[in-house]
Image (cartoon, rainbow, N blue to C red):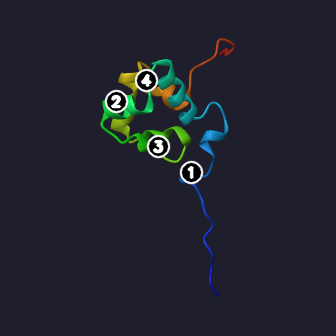
Amino acid sequence: MGTTKSKSSVFPWDDSAYPGAFSARLRAKRKASNMSVEQLSETIHVSKYTIYKWESGQSLPALPMLYALSEILDVSTDELIKGSLTETTTFD
């Protein structure tokens, strides 16, 4: 009796399916910085395909790359990973 493996992504969720996802935040921050995929990839010394994978939710950057992205895109690592607090968020 053979078993078949189902095709699965790197993550148990579809990271690109919701707007608060890391991939969407990375793409938005890159575009807000007026950087192309090619420019960002050259700046942090990775292939443009690596950036495409990060922005499509197929993979995540290693911690040193997160720090580099944070510096280049002028955003905190927390904001890249978790997103920012909205003005309507209150803590009681």
Give SS at disc 2. helix
43 or 36: nearer the viewer: 36
Which numbered marker is on residue 68?
2
Label 3: how many residues lie within 10 Å, few (<14), some (14-19) or many (20+)?
some
The mark nearer the N terminus, 3 or 1, is: 1
Most foreground residue, 33 or 68: 33
Given the image, on which type of amino acid does mark 2 rest? Ala
* CA separation in Å, label 2 and label 3: 13 Å
Reading the image, the residue beneath label 1 is 11
Q: How much space separates mark 3 and mark 1, taking CA atoms?
A: 10 Å
Residue at which label 4 appears: 35
Mark 1 or mark 4, earlier in chain: 1
Q: Which mark is residue 60?
A: 3
**Nearest to N terminus: mark 3 or mark 4:** 4
Query: Which amino acid type is shown beneath numbered disc 1?
Result: Phe
Relative to residue 16, is residue 92 depicted above or below?
A: above
Q: Quadrant of residue 37?
A: top left
Q: Residue furthest bottom?
A: 1
The secondary structure type at the circle numbered 1 is: loop
